[in-house]
Image: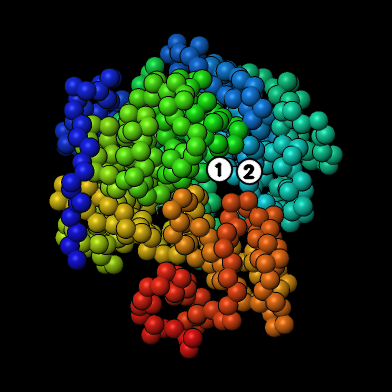
Amino acid sequence: MKKSSPGAHIIKKDLKKFPKIPNVTNYEEAYKNFSWEKAEKEYIDFFPDGTMNAAYNMIDRHVEKGKGKKTALLFESATGEKEKYTYEDLRRESNKFANVLESQDVEKGDRVFIFLPSIPERYIAFIGILKVGAIAGTLFSAFQEAALLDRLADSKAKILITNAVLFPRIQKIWKDLPHLEKVIVVERGSLNQPEEKNLVFYNKEMEKASEKFEIVHLSKDDFSYMLYTSGTTGKPKGVVHAHGDVLQALVTTRDVLDVHDDDIYWCTADLGWVTGVVYGALGPWALGATQVLFEGRFSPENWYKVLEENKVTVWYTAPTAIRMLMGSEVKPKDYALSSLRHLCSVGEPLNPEAIWWSLEAFGLPFHDTWWQTEQGSITIPNYPIMDIKPGSMGKPLPGIIAAIIDDKGNEIPQGEEGHLALKASTVQSLMKQIWGNEEKFKSYFVGDWPAGHSLGDAWYISGDKAYKDEDGYFWFIGRADDVIKTSGERVGPFEVESSLVECEEVVEAGVIGKPDELRGEIIKAFVVLKPGIEGTAELIEKLKLHVKKHLAGHAYPREIEFIDKLPKTRSGKIMRRVLKAKELGLPIGDTSTLEDY
Ligand code: WTA
């Protein structure tokens, strides 16, 4: 069936009505004239020897250019204490931390992981790691030992930075991590310091460390950070990014999020998620922006207060949070939020209702943006100047070629559903590898691949299904695989299934994403119990708790159903799409590979 845009409810934009002229005033012109080479010359500072470092571009160069006194970070802790960091402060602290890392023999290419809540040290550590040329791995503080073990073992992390509250989870698995040499403990507010050999204490080392550091000179292709993310099968994979990503991160922060020099910008994403890395650190700081960091938990009161007290002007958040705000008794009109100027969203489909609500609640529409961990920056957004077609993800970033293609890599006609793909060589911040898994890396591409080390003419396949309408807007349809997006978090069904089968009562489990109005999807598990075990309400609670306590706080199944048998292929693979179709009352589709069921 050929699809076209729903049409009727377009939000028209008029340049004359913008309170501040957006950084891009004409999308079509920008698309026509954009060149990454030009952008690189304009936005990225290289060292005189032609090398670079993303951290230098994020922090130090601003200080050298006289912006050292500008606020880089406005922090509010979970208990309400406020702190302010200038660019000069971040330069000094990250230099000191880089020296601490060097004193621990950290070298270029070593993996250094950060397992902390949203506090400034998490960011100082991140910048310091980039300065020494090591690879920064970021982790959600909700991770429990199973998720931590997978990531730290696969990456062979050498150093981990954590605090006394989170350390016990590492303590449990350290014996299984022969490469983990030292754990650096950040002491903010924690009274009982852990005792164990090979611990290094942040404050003590930072006190001794020099404020001067010679930033390691690197090439654009040298690795900067890595993030584990879920696919359909197997354990999470380490997506590895490079220092050169900073260019696309900066350009999109400027042109899509429309951050100006005097803005107060707030990205609500956690540093454990790619959005937190790219739009809570790399992009805004490379652009020289002032940004807000809030350690506290989400609640409508908390968030509206953060917006109000900091006079936030540009806000980047996610659909589940927006829907929670929509559904709350606490209303934005009770807060002074008139500073808000531009709103953006990412991570899951942004439903049109959320845009209509924000227009009413803030007088501003949310602008949807689409991208993925593997892509390293926004690639298909709604620009401030573009008319919004609510429900559409927008149009390709200038400099980037996007298309809908078939399984063989041929473009398919406008209006028809297919794989959403990007011309790989046009995405500056595309991942450089999947850690230790060349085969998986290659599986993302079709077409002319690989031409030596270049991406040639290959298409990068996103795994999302979409279509393009008559005006060039892209519309999201769904995932082509079984990856679950719950409250914006990407969860692999295999990880949850593996966690469930650790329970002695369970024989096997099949896990799906079930559509949910609030969270986009929730995790639902179908569980086969051992003979004689009864599927009681208590057992359901026990299984949920097991996943929460051992895998991750956010990755537990909100629904569990006991069944006698899982649908499987003849070769024994769980057919999650059959479970999903049954759950939703949809036709099961092709069952030729299905074992008798
Ligand atoms: C989904 C997030 C619809 C999509 C930066 C993608 C979206 C996956 C959108 C990547 C959007 C992200 N509309 N779906 N605007 N943005 N997604 O790696 O399925 O956490 O493949 O990166 O989220 O999730 P990830």
Does residue 592 sit above or below 50 in this rendering? below
Q: Position of residue 427 (x, y in %)?
A: 33, 45
User: Which residue was labeled with disc 2?
Assistant: 141
Does residue 203 sit above or below 453 in this rendering? above
User: Which residue was labeled with disc 1?
Assistant: 272
Mark 2 burial class by Cα count in 10 Å: few <14, some 14-19, many 20+: some
> Identity of the amino acid at label 2?
Ser
Dot 1 falls on a residue whose secondary structure is loop
> Identity of the amino acid at label 1?
Gly
Q: Residue at x 67, y 51 (%)?
A: 144
Numbered-mark total: 2
Query: Which residue occupies the foreground of this view, 504 or 560?
Result: 560
Q: Position of residue 497 (x, y in %)?
A: 59, 67
Describe residue 50's horizontal placement relative to residue 447 as left or right. right
Q: Contact, CB < 8 Å: mark 1 with mark 2?
A: yes
Q: Residue at x 60, y 58 (%)?
A: 556
- Gap in Å between the C-alphas at discs 1 and 2? 8 Å
Q: Is the N terminus in the top left, top right, bottom left or bottom right quadrant? A: bottom left
